[in-house]
Amino acid sequence: MKQGKWGKIISTAVILLSLAMVLIIAFTNPELANAWEVLFTLDKGYLALAILCYAGYVYAEGAGLFAFLRMEGFRVKLSSAAHFSFAGMYYANITPSSTGGQPMQVYQMAQRGVPAGVATSALTARYFFNQLAVVAITVLLWVLNRDFAAAQVGHVAGLIVLGCVVNFACVPIIIAIMCNRALVERAALWGIRFLARRRICRQPEKWKKKAMESIDHFHTSLMDLVKHPGHLLFQLIISVAEMTFLMLVPLLVYKALGLSGTPWYHILMLSFMLFVSASYTPLPGASGAQEGGFLVYFAGVYTGGTISVALLVWRFVTYYLCLLVGCADAVYVGIRKRRKPIDRDYSAERTNS
């Protein structure tokens, strides 16, 4: 059996195992004998808002890609940019360490006529601002609510600090790459020579030409962004909105359960802390770390044993629903005709340069 098939089997097994674990936790919790009753008496208004928040998370990421590609002169629609966004989230959720998300986005954009270098620079910019936003908000909320944080998650503070460091690491790395194009080119050429010596790369000169073109597109696009402070600010605002949409889901689940007593900003802080400390787990959808972290971070917040039902609803909205819709979308993309290429306005490109 090929390695790729083994990877799919393992990823599927991990996803099914995490689903089974969540269901077992939800319906065998000794503190909550009527889990089914609680589940079916959730406030539908708050539940709908939770789903809308996740949709806002997807569309905010799409808006960031939309603005970047428009800046580069591509006449992309917001709906197309949101589709690229959702495809990335779906494939990130079904591959270890989220490794499949960005390659699929680059592939889909390239299929529509966006050069791989420009697509990569757009995704790099989005990743940069998302990580910057999530770490900055986490630290800010932690400082503002340090007494509650110490009492609620003080015993796992080291994991939160580690998560902040890991998530923030991309910021100086991306800046270094932007400031040292020659280093990127040397690394690409070394990689091509390495592959050529092992006869994996049969046409090294052709690969070198494509690599240099992609690096040129990548570097030029990122430098275009740096030259436009308005675009920089917009990308940061979009990232703040995007990450906030995602972190509001536990709060809306809390409200859907009819609970009260914990301020909204405390729940929001715990959501950010859970994200930074679990997001780097090398399993599809950070399975295991997300579920375990939820039970640890929100212990005592979801009272009366409702934390098990809250875990099921939260994970459904932010993960399993994405898998269901993403699977249907992947099938649709596979059977539909090739989409029309995205036109490019080269006058806009010259204006940016």
Image (spheres, helix red, strand yellow):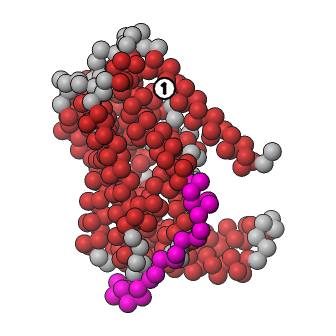
Is 74 rendered above or below residue 139? Answer: below
Residue 60 picture quarter: bottom left
Residue appearing at x 29%, y 71% in the figure: 231
Report whether residue 343 is seen. yes
Residue 281: x %, y % from top left: 51, 39
Q: Which residue is mark 1?
A: 22
Residue 347: x %, y % from top left: 38, 90
Is 268 displayed left or right of 290 in the figure? left
Residue appearing at x 70%, y 80% in the figure: 206
Is 333 displayed left or right of 257 in the figure? right
Q: Amino acid at mark 1?
A: Val
Residue in front for this viewpoint, 239 or 306: 306
Q: Give the magenta range.
A: 330-353
Secondary structure beneath dot 1 equals helix
In the rendered image, which quarter contains the N terminus? top right
Is 331 rendered above or below residue 11? Answer: below
Rate crowding at label 1 as few (under 14), some (14 to 19) or many (20 or more) other CA atoms within 10 Å: many
Report whether residue 269 is seen. no
Residue 258: x %, y % from top left: 23, 25
Magenta span contains residue 332: yes
Magenta span contains residue 293: no
Residue in front for this viewpoint, 114 or 143: 114
Residue appearing at x 68%, y 40% in the figure: 9
Is 123 displayed left or right of 200 in the figure? left
